[in-house]
Image: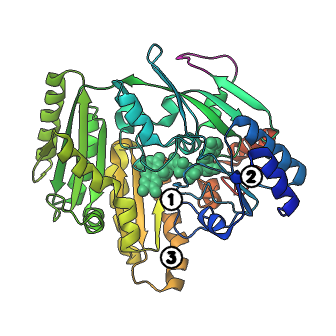
Amino acid sequence: MYNRVTPRIVDDLRAIVGEGNVRTDEEALEKYAHDETVGLWAQPEVVVFAHSAQEVAGVFRLAVRERIPVTPRGAGYGLSGGAVPVFGGIVLSTEKMNRILEIDKQNLMITVEPGVITGDIHRAVEAEGLFYPPDPASLDSCSIGGNIAEGAGGPRAVKYGTTKDYVCGLEAVLPSGDIITCGGKLVKNVTGYNLVQLLVGSEGTLAVVTRIILRLLPLPKYRVDLLVPYDDFQAAADTVSDIIAARILPATIEFMEQDSVLAAERLLQKTVPYDDAAAHLLIQLDGNRPEAVEGDFEAVGEICLAHGARDVLVAKDTRTRDRLWEARRAIVDALKHESPVNHMEDVVVPRAEIPALLRGIKEIARRHGVRIVCFGHAGDGNVHVNALKDALPDGEWQALVPVLTEEIYRLTLSLGGTLTGEHGVGATRRRYLPMALDPAQIALMRGIKEVFDPHHILNPGKIFP
Ligand SMILES: Cc1cc2nc3c(=O)[nH]c(=O)nc-3n(C[C@H](O)[C@H](O)[C@H](O)COP(=O)(O)OP(=O)(O)OC[C@H]3O[C@@H](n4cnc5c(N)ncnc54)[C@H](O)[C@@H]3O)c2cc1C
């Protein structure tokens, strides 16, 4: 189906991106064979580091001519195998395209290259009193290009939305080698189809993004973080839907059940207050008027206590706040330490269905006698569901994972939800796509892919069953 990368092709790649930007050594092939998805691995034949749209275009023209698959890669922190080259060929890394090109304070926009680490964008704009809200828990490791490709979310999606809500303009290279510029520093734009939003969340299957314009907000002046422990798992879940129903919009409502908190403590060697609680909520309120933030904080505190919260701990200073969030951000890694073999789902339901989702998942876990740990962005309906292999024999685990996955998806779909809220379909969920999308939609999506990539060289083996 595809051709192999020959020494002549490697030389051609060197001519496009320069001698030091092409690697075929074992160390590089091993490093770029995986992202953060547990159990998924496929070696590229060559790794190429691009510095410009023109270089990406050159790589694409060569790949089409030689019929070699190209897998774009940002920082390799994805959780659905999007950057894993399942058909071998070229991994095209954007990690050297890592410049912040401009912070435009007149238009409240930032222009960046795709390899910039998301946390660096936060720090750069916050130093200017500005705010880029999307905050994936991986923000100190993942790239903005990967965030665009995955449509990344984060805790603050409850109030501020996800990456898609901030992308105003993109430069992208099509598999044909054509370089397109869509959108711009524009708050409004209805000239033709919205190609910017088609590329957001397209998981590196339609084009490689080489320049990004993001909308910024003024940095909120006041912030309060609340850590709320519960003895009853279900009471914590019920609180989430009641806060939303009370028409209070916190910046975040994160849910962490006890196993996830204990795993984070063990990894970080630090304690979280009330670690004997069945579940914690981590709620952040922000705004520009202290009275408004305090008012919301009191109302939220009352709702929590009415649902039987043991306490409402308040973090107003950066040190206490960082300690709370450090534990939350460590959970994915901590669960990997707990059980190196595990399976993570990223389901999303309408927010009011969070209690039913969590109840249903506990029931699935009980029925199969397996440990399933839930945590995540409960305030926007997106829960990470981690099944842990623990001591289960390999064969039993391998047979169980597809059964659990299907049951979790069936439950989610029955509640009006869908398969993935932010981690993407990638290589790991593609066989389940027909559970969520009807044949007409999948055919439309395949048609779009065909228009962008008629030679099927860009990131094959992703999204489609
Ligand atoms: C500990 C941990 C916590 C996480 N928390 C969150 C979270 O809170 N929210 C969330 O949304 N995700 C989260 N993730 C998942 C992950 O970090 C995001 O999906 C992130 O957007 C991936 O960015 P990356 O640069 O690592 O992308 P990669 O893994 O390198 O690539 C991801 C996809 O993007 C494509 N791609 C990369 N760059 C480009 C480009 N320039 N043009 C076109 N396609 C491109 C790749 O082909 C691939 O399909 C977490 C992951 C970990 C390990």
Q: Classify mark 1: residues with Cα within 10 Å, few (<14), some (14-19) or many (20+).
A: some
Boundaries of the magenta span? 184-192
Q: Helix or strand or loop: what does disc 3 sit on?
A: helix
Residue 56 x, y percent position in the rendering? 73, 41
**Magenta includes 190?**
yes
Q: Amino acid at mark 2?
A: Glu
Residue 222 x, y percent position in the rendering? 21, 28
Q: Helix or strand or loop: what does disc 1 sit on?
A: helix
Tell me if residue 321 comes above or below residue 24 in the rendering: above
Tell me if residue 258 comes above or below residue 129 in the rendering: below
Camera-nearest residue between 127 and 462: 127
Taking the image as shown, residue 8 lies to the left or right of residue 331, namely: right
Which residue does the numbered mark 2 point to in the structure image? Answer: 19
Q: Classify mark 3: residues with Cα within 10 Å, few (<14), some (14-19) or many (20+).
A: some
Q: Residue at x 13, y 40 (%)?
A: 301
Q: Residue at x 79, y 33 (%)?
A: 178
| Sequence-first disc among 2 and 1 | 2
Q: What separation in Å lies between label 3 and label 1 (alpha carbons)?
A: 15 Å
Q: From the image, which quarter does the N terminus lie in? A: bottom right
Residue 427 x, y percent position in the rendering? 63, 59
Comparing labels 2 and 1, the label whose residue is closer to the camera: 2
Comparing labels 2 and 3, the label whose residue is closer to the camera: 2
**Chief SS of the magenta region:** loop
Which residue does the numbered mark 3 point to in the structure image? Answer: 400
Camera-nearest residue between 161 and 338: 338
Tell me if residue 323 comes above or below residue 315 in the rendering: below
Camera-nearest residue between 101 and 439: 101
Kindly identify which numbered label has been placed on residue 410: 1
Q: Classify mark 2: residues with Cα within 10 Å, few (<14), some (14-19) or many (20+).
A: few
Q: Amino acid at mark 3?
A: Leu
Taking the image as shown, residue 369 lies to the left or right of residue 212, namely: left
Q: Helix or strand or loop: what does disc 2 sit on?
A: helix
